[in-house]
Amino acid sequence: MALETAGAADERQPEPRRLHHITRIDIEPSEAHPRRHPTHGWQVRARRDGKRLSKFFADAKHDGRDGALGEAIEYRDRLLASLPDEPQKPRKAWSNTGVVGLSVREKDEGPKPKLYVQLNWVNAEGKRKAGSYSVEKWGLRRALWNGCLKLYRERQAAGYPVEEPHVMFARAQEPFQDQIAAEIRAEQAAERAEAEPAAAPTSSVAPRFESREAALAHEEATVRRLEDALFS
């Protein structure tokens, strides 16, 4: 899974700030989430007067990566031209989730960068603290929730004003709604696939015993094996 920030991508572009307001999204199945739905494309995001505007351009629907990027750039240009020119209010801290102190970032670990939900807060002693949750381990939705809950608990413990975790969580999901929807669909499909074999009629035949005593002895042996597994 990878998320390419606009700032990092701009450094590789011949035209300065070509990817302003545009983020690359690449989500792949992993060992922890083998059934995760692949998602590849470009996300356009902007904010005006407190409103967040977002649209995703999938590679598969726009003739590949370059075609999707072209559509995203055209949409970005039309969108920014239609928005009012008032400057946005400065943010207290950098964030790509809409929640101050919570962001989704890449970390270079091994041959392939990994995605994390990064959080920062100030404790009761005035010291800056940080933490992170792996998207590969938790999934994007759960990692965002863990981050929001952690920020809520830490800021509350330090005596600072703080929003309820579900309010922060709802806002943090907005820029990534397409990826999260795909993640939920993949999880639901995996749950259905796991449930189907259990619900399907089995063709196995129950063991037959020569007497009731033999059946009871078999049942007792089964119970003992279960107890050994649970309490040994």
Image (tube, rainbow, N blue to C red):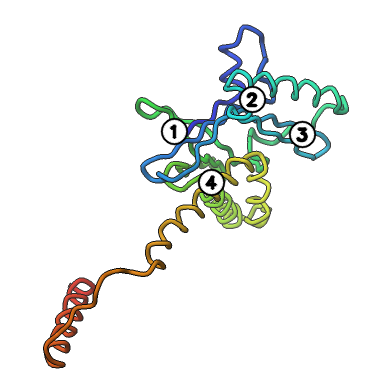
Q: Please say if 12 is above or below 215.
A: above
The residue nearer to you, when weighing 60 against 183, is: 60
| Earlier sequence position, callout 2 versus callout 4 | 2
User: Marks 2 and 1: which is nearer the front?
Assistant: 2
Q: CA distance from mark 2 to mark 1?
A: 26 Å
Please state the horizontal and vertical placement of residue 24, each as a whole percent of the image.
Answer: 58, 27
Q: CA distance from mark 1 to mark 3?
A: 27 Å
| Earlier sequence position, callout 2 versus callout 1 | 2
Q: Residue at x 64, y 56 (%)?
A: 166
Q: In the structure shown, which secondary structural element does the residue marked by tag 3 occupy?
A: strand
Q: Which mark is residue 62?
A: 2
Q: In the structure shown, which secondary structural element does the residue marked by tag 1 occupy?
A: strand
Callout 3 crowding tier (Cα within 10 Å): few <14, some 14–19, many ≥20: some
Asked whether, in this view, residue 174 is left or right of residue 151, the answer is right
The amino acid pointed to by label 3 is Arg
| Earlier sequence position, callout 4 versus callout 3 | 3
Q: CA distance from mark 1 to mark 4?
A: 17 Å
The number of discs equals: 4
Q: Which residue is mark 3?
A: 47
Q: Residue at x 76, y 34 (%)?
A: 47
The answer to whether the residues at label 1 and label 3 have Cβ atoms under 8 Å apart is no
Q: Which mark is residue 140?
A: none
Q: In the structure shown, which secondary structural element does the residue marked by tag 2 occupy?
A: loop
Q: Which residue is mark 1?
A: 114
